[in-house]
Image: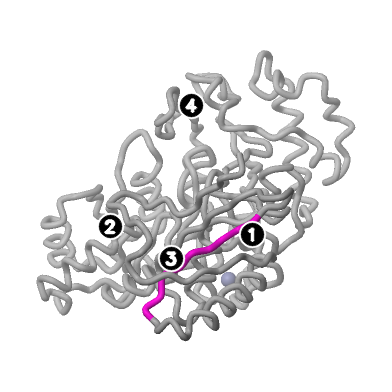
């Protein structure tokens, strides 16, 4: 994607400021790089990436790019693997985040007349408070519930006439099911759901949308880069607009780090344009998506990315082709006769990678060859290589209560 001249100017000014900070995070990271020599997008693209591990190493306040007195708040990403990442925010950062979030609500057609029930958690992480600040900025009435206590959620939803619910996709589904179960749908005034970015399939989306009777919007964001609210899809399409006045986006091949052409899937890399407390240059998010090329029907010029299709950790490369579970699920969903369960085996035999895709079907055996052939050709069309497709009876593939492992890479 072409970097806008304003974006380049902002990045350049930011780099110059960061290099001046004695002992600063980027002054150290980019030591030896002549910032003055960065004159074009191509020069910028030669800068090394910022990895999550670099951020962890900066714990507690090593990322801060301003004097301590300018910091008004910190947030932290969950430290499931040891040290958490701590992000300091200045007053401007907090304001900018609320501004971006309010814009998200506006893109979803939400106004100050709305009542927004917020179910993501409040705390060190960035979820609830982002939804809250955006709602206040917009002038809507926020109900800061936080997660859980479904009984109370539903009571408040009725008593205060919530018109918007903010939730994870799994909690939205649970709410939808409870509303259905209790037969209180006619007492619920919900019109819209704003769903925090996580991977969720089209099937789940349709279920939530139908059962709750609402329009759904996907919001994108991550703690390292403000939090949720740096982009949302518009009414025209499911792709998410990312706010180009605050965020510069790149999509790279997760293995090589090379930029991929617009439209091709890869890892989202983010550079912040206005952040003061903890600016990030070429930060690798590990989220997988792709640029959706071309203008959006809605008229917005903010660039678009597809719904997040997974994490780079889920990706496998076979015969030079990158693929991830969501793509395989899409192939399954498109294949007439294939049920939702599948398993992928990747082997290396006689110097060549082989991918076998087992899928369940309830069709008679006589139809299997046709379904297998059909699946292989859809796979080839969508992913770019031909698998060995193999039908099995429903119930033959293993199931697990936890997340079922579906891809087995036996090559290494
Ligand atoms: Zn649009």
Which is nearer the N-term, disc 2 or disc 3? 2
Q: CB under 8 Å between callouts 2 and 3? A: no
How many C-alpha atoms fall within 10 Å of the one at disc 1: few (<14), some, or many (≥20)?
A: many
In the image, residue 226 above or below residue 303: above
User: Within 8 Å of ligand 1, the CB of disc 1?
Assistant: no
How many C-alpha atoms fall within 10 Å of the one at disc 3: few (<14), some, or many (≥20)?
A: some
Indicate which disc residue 290 carries. Answer: 1
Which is nearer the N-term, disc 4 or disc 1? 4
Which residue is identified by label 4? 71
Bounds of the magenta span? 354-362
Q: Is residue 92 in view from this perspective?
A: no
How many C-alpha atoms fall within 10 Å of the one at disc 2: few (<14), some, or many (≥20)?
A: some
Q: How far apart are marks 4 and 1 (CA)?
A: 34 Å
Residue 269 among those drawn in magenta: no
The residue that appears at 61% across and 70% down in the rendered structure is 379
Q: Is residue 51 left or right of residue 134?
A: right
In the image, residue 216 above or below residue 350: below
């Amino acid at each position: 994607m072409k970097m806008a001249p304003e974006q380049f100017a902002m990045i350049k000014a930011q780099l110059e400021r960061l290099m001046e900070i004695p002992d600063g995070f980027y002054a150290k990271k980019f030591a030896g790089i002549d910032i003055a020599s960065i004159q074009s997008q191509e020069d910028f693209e030669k800068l090394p990436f910022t990895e999550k591990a670099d951020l962890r190493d900066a714990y507690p306040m090593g990322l801060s790019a301003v004097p301590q007195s300018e910091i008004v708040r910190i947030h932290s990403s969950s430290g499931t693997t040891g040290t958490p990442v701590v992000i300091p925010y200045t007053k401007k950062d907090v304001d900018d985040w609320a501004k971006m979030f309010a814009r998200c609500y506006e893109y979803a057609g939400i106004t100050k007349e709305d009542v927004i029930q917020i179910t993501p958690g409040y705390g060190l992480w960035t979820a609830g408070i982002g939804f809250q600040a955006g709602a206040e900025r917009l002038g809507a009435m926020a109900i800061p519930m936080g997660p859980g206590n479904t009984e109370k959620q539903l009571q408040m939803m009725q008593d205060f006439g919530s018109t918007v619910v903010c939730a994870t996709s799994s909690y939205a589904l649970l709410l939808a099911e409870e509303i259905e179960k209790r037969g209180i749908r006619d007492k619920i005034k919900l019109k819209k759901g704003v769903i925090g970015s996580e991977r969720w399939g089209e099937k789940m989306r349709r279920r939530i949308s139908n059962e709750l009777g609402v329009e759904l919007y996907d919001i994108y964001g991550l703690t390292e880069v403000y939090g949720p609210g740096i982009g949302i899809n518009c009414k025209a399409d499911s792709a998410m607009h990312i706010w180009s006045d605050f965020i510069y986006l790149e999509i790279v091949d997760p293995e090589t780090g090379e930029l991929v052409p617009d439209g091709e899937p890869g890892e989202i890399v983010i550079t912040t344009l206005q952040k003061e407390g903890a600016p990030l240059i070429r930060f690798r998010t590990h989220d997988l998506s792709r640029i959706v090329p071309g203008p959006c029907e809605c008229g917005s010029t903010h660039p678009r990315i597809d719904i997040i299709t997974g994490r780079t950790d889920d990706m496998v490369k076979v015969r030079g082709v990158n693929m991830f579970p969501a793509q395989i699920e899409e192939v399954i969903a498109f294949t007439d006769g294939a049920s939702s369960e599948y398993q992928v085996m990747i082997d290396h035999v006689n110097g060549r990678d082989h991918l076998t895709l087992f899928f369940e079907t309830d069709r008679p055996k006589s139809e299997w060859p046709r379904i297998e052939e059909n699946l292989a050709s859809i796979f080839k069309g969508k992913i770019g290589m031909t698998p060995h497709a193999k039908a099995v009876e429903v119930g033959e593939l293993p199931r697990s209560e936890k997340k079922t492992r579906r891809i087995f890479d036996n090559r290494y």
